Amino acid sequence: MTGMLAEGALLVTERGDQVEVVELLGSGGQGEVYRVRTADGGQAALKWYYPACATAEQQGIVQGLVARDFEDDRFLWPLAFVPAVADAGPGFGYLMELRPDRFRGLPALFRRQLRTSTVALLTACLQTVEAYQALHSRGIAYRDISWGNLFFDPANGDILVCDNDNAVVEGDASGIGGTMEFMAPELVRGDPGARPGTQSDLHSLSVLLFMVLMNHHPLKGRLELAIHCLDEAAERQLYGRQPVFMFDPVDSSNRPDPVEQGAVAHAWEAFPQSLRALFVHNFTVGLRDPSARVRESQWRDALRAVLDAVVECAGCGRQNATEPSATGPGACWGCGRTLVLPPRLVVITPPPRSERRILLRRGARLQQHHLVAEPARHDYGDRTLVAELVEHPSRPGRFGLLNRSDSAWTGLRTDGTTQQIAPGQTVPLRAGLELDLGPAWALVVAP
Amino acid sequence: MSAGPWQLVGGSVQGPGKPSNQDAFDAGGSGGSGSPVILAVADGHGSAAHPRSAVGARIAVRQFVRLVGELMDTARSVELPEATLLRRLMSSAQHDLPRRLAAEWRREVLDHWQRQPGEAAGPEERLLLYGTTLLGAVLTPQLFAAWQLGDGELTVVDDDGSVSQPLAPERARLGDETESLGEAHAWRSVRVHWAPIVAPGRGPRLVALSTDGLSKSFAEPDGITRFVGGLDEHLREQGLEQVRAVLSGWLGEAARHSGDDATLAAAWRNPLGTEQPGRPDESVLEESG
């Protein structure tokens, strides 16, 4: 494949560092991405814009983003601006880190080409919400949220947001016409005064979350299948003039077709009411009123609660996202059997007091973010692990909480006696056991 | 609409001993403004389990040509900066077109069944009767994109003479097993090649789509890439008319060796300019089943 830059071409970043083009990695909607060798012998990725996309406006955005020096491992952020040189042709580009192989694009998920789990998908959604929240809190609107920008690790739900080169300071008027199926209705219609920003990002974010969890677009039900020629006018109708949510509780005109779209109807039923309610709100009220859209903090609270309420079906082993506030077990979405709920760990955080309810399923983990009311980030990695449910090595079926933190806990049994649980020690799981975890208190509650 | 730089050649020859040709193909356009080159070949599965696959292949080609034509018409009609347009097109090409192709094929196949009903019970069984592969491509002054479901070869000669197969699967499939438009969720198996053309001379100079009746005729695994490399050489040295005159003989020879229908649809960018608006030789088109 012939790219814009030849192998071996030498370029110099705006900071004066030389890079050498190694190979073309792929072509996108705005430019090509190359693997390059850096002056220190390392490797990086270079995005090089197509001539039509290498506008002065785009250059200004990229240089502005580089100057922001935004450090966040959830983003592949532009690190250095790379101007044109004589033998590389016109245009410009920017350096970023290479995307590690473990991160896969959403098309592979939609096409069922990778193995993942309900927990990984929910984690990916939560991390996505927090990543965009981090941007918005800095006054930056992403403006181009779509399935093409998000990569995730199907094993654990870690995410990486790529193609960040359309993000601008909120209120910046520079134009961007994102992918229409992710655009907020007011932008699709071209309403007077409507402009891409945080409010329209919230619509795009909700579409993205729906697609990750349901593998389908929320507005593409029967109405889309009835369109034989999906031209510009039809798309504007579907996404702008008359958008109808597939699961709108009042308007059933766009329900999924049972043959062509049966999978999304099944997926919808597999998620708890608290999560579905947010989608319904966003894709009914939120379609008409941008200010009423579901905020990142609402998504975050709902997603983390559902993540803590995932349980495996004892019959088929599938992970089920149960309703966090439910008192009784539901049925498995896969095999239909009644689920068996395990004990629950109820964690009370220090003020502002809040409650976390974690189902102690096999392999359940308590993380540092469970111990504070407003964590900056929900990290599910080993570095922030506090406790882990483990099975007794010689007595199968007996479980305990292993202290994986670096400080001792105090346990209070129902008979009033106390016990110190040092790092590396396990406390047997019993209903009524209270734990002083340092910053927070926890109580084991029988199912 | 303006005359474009591409000229087309194509043909299809029935395999020996087969009751009918289950391949189908189409090639049209010149690559000029308003006239995208659209190529498609389809290989109906042909075995006893797929008795209507010749119809399925023709429907696949027809729907692909229609949907890609509409996509290009839409792209031409909207007033958007080129940068935005490319992004929209990429999303449609990678995400929407495979889904719509599978859905429209399914719809037309079930319509055909309504007109000519048989004994199969449910819709899924009926679709399998029409099972086919599909390989298609589009070329405009700004874009080269291709889609593939199932076997067959997309072989590309770049401007520097290098030959590649950008849609070759990562792992070769065993025997005659192939993905099919007749399967549930067929769109998930569609592979997409996306390659905007950023400057004249940066894109391909020959794009060839063929069914596996051609590639299976070669003893060597790289036979098809060598064949297309040779086709490029013939076109440059002897011209389009000479190649059109001998193509059916080559395909007939391939069909004899592979025992299968052999089909090729190709677009060639003549370095000397446009000779004539390109459609494949009509006499060869007649053999396309």
Image (spheres, coloured by chain):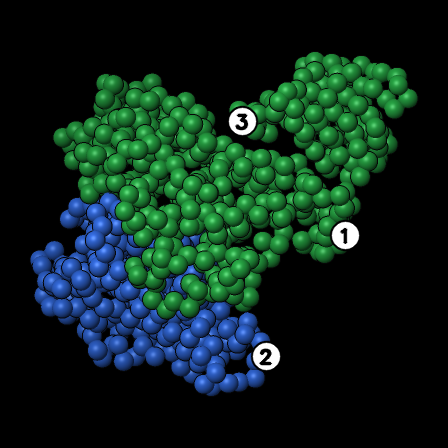
Chain colours: A green, B blue
Q: What percent of the width, then of the height, locates residue A221?
A: 47, 61
Q: Which residue is mark 3?
A: A377
Q: Is residue B288 above or below residue A309?
A: below
The answer to which of A329 and B92 lies nearer the viewer is: A329
- SS for dot 2: loop
Q: Which residue is mark 2?
A: B121
- Tell me what residue is drawn at x 31 percent, y 41 percent: A195
- Tell me what residue is drawn at x 67 percent, y 14 percent: A406
In whole angstroms, how far apart are the C-alphas of marks 3 and 2?
Answer: 54 Å
- Tell me what residue is drawn at x 49 percent, y 32 percent: A130
Q: Quadrant of the C terminus of chain B?
A: bottom left
Q: What percent of the width, then of the height, locates residue A124?
A: 53, 38
Q: Is residue B220 above or below residue A212?
A: below
Does residue B96 appear left or right of residue A213 in this picture?
left
Q: What percent of the width, then of the height, locates residue A307?
A: 63, 38
Q: Is residue A86 visible?
A: yes
Task: Specify the quadrant of the image occupied by residue B106.
Answer: bottom left
